[in-house]
Image (spheres, rainbow, N blue to C red):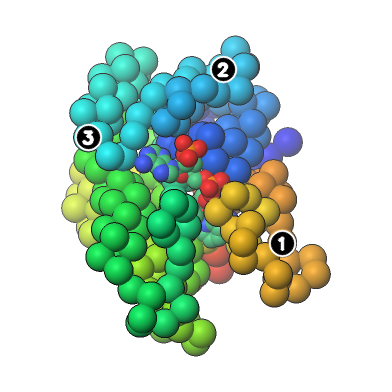
Amino acid sequence: MIDLSSFQPNMRIAVIGASGGIGHALTAHLAANEHSAQIFALSRSGDAQAHPKVTPLRFDFTQEQSLMDAQDTMKAAGEFDLIIIATGLLHGQDLAPEKNIRAMSHNGFAQNFLINTAGPALCAKYMLPLLRHDRKTVFAALSARVGSISDNRLGGWYAYRASKAALNMVIKTLAIEHGRRLKQAAIIGLHPGTVDTKLSKPFQNNVPDGKLFTPEQSAGYLLGVINRVSAEQSGQVFDWDGKTVPA
Ligand SMILES: NC(=O)c1ccc[n+]([C@@H]2O[C@H](COP(=O)([O-])OP(=O)(O)OC[C@H]3O[C@@H](n4cnc5c(N)ncnc54)[C@H](OP(=O)(O)O)[C@@H]3O)[C@@H](O)[C@H]2O)c1
């Protein structure tokens, strides 16, 4: 069982992007944990794993109203201890990470920034106010190591890298604004490692043996980081093993 003992019992939790590889595994770990009481599982389909603690909710980052509606439903349930954003986009229809500047497109930047930067930022707008004030809380968004400017050695993937670097800036800025109000909250970014999901599938060829995590493995590591993090570390981005990812 994952250790969530730094939180008070009966945690109310939201996983945004619960249909994704990592989001689904996070939801399963959290539902099985004795520390959790209720988990809102937000996805575009509105489907979620059948479990007495799991409440499915529908949302889509392309429709801000859907976040307002989710906020209303969540607010009616009470205050939250943990909110995790597990959404993200790297490739899709008419979208692939750029190998060089010739592959750049307005569409690529627009889609990446909409889902990887503006989406989590708007989640914060509607969901940070739902965090409780009287105990440790965490608001975590899945970012990526490739969003680190100082760690960029390979180049390429312009729009995805830039959208994650921008997400990291959003996280830092939220931590400054909300640190004044939510004194026990850690607002953090998380790099999950390279994880075997739909998002990474086309790019797994060069992953060294033993370095490709299952979603369950990565979700377990990320919850470990979330359990260990404190409000003093708010605004930072952490690797799956708890090391700081430099800006
Ligand atoms: N996998 C890796 O190796 C890896 C490495 C570094 C960072 N990450 C980061 O980890 C996070 C989770 O990735 P993953 O590997 O679990 O990917 P995934 O399996 O492809 O999941 C992506 C999630 O994002 C959701 N999403 C996409 N567009 C959306 C929209 N318009 N509105 C609402 N939700 C939307 C998807 O919903 P649908 O199911 O409806 O499409 C899905 O729940 C991402 O932020 C990713 O950048 C992953």
**Could you say where residue 80 lies in the image, as x and y percent from the top left?**
38, 29
**Could you say where residue 4 lies in the image, as x and y percent from the top left?**
60, 38
Contact, CB < 8 Å: mark 2 with mark 1? no
Q: Is residue 89 above or below residue 46?
A: below
Q: Is mark 2 within 8 Å of ligand 1?
A: no
**23 sits left or right of 152 in the view:** right
> Which residue is disc 3 drawn over?
64
Q: Residue at x 62, y 61 (%)?
A: 202
Q: At numbered mark 2, what does the secondary structure look like: helix, strand or loop?
A: loop
**Could you say where residue 131 lies in the image, as x and y percent from the top left?**
33, 34
Q: Mark 2 to mark 1: distance in Å?
A: 30 Å
Say few, some or many: other residues with alpha carbon within 10 Å of mark 2 (under 14 / 14 to 19 / 20 or more).
some
Contact, CB < 8 Å: mark 2 with mark 3? no
Q: Which comes before the other along the chain, label 2 or label 1? A: 2
> Which residue is disc 1 drawn over?
212
> Which residue is disc 2 drawn over?
53
Amino acid at pointer 2: Lys
Quarter residue 16 falls in: top left
Q: Mark 3 to mark 1: distance in Å?
A: 34 Å
- Which one is in front, 17 or 236? 17
Q: Residue at x 48, y 18 (%)?
A: 55
Q: At numbered mark 1, what does the secondary structure look like: helix, strand or loop?
A: strand
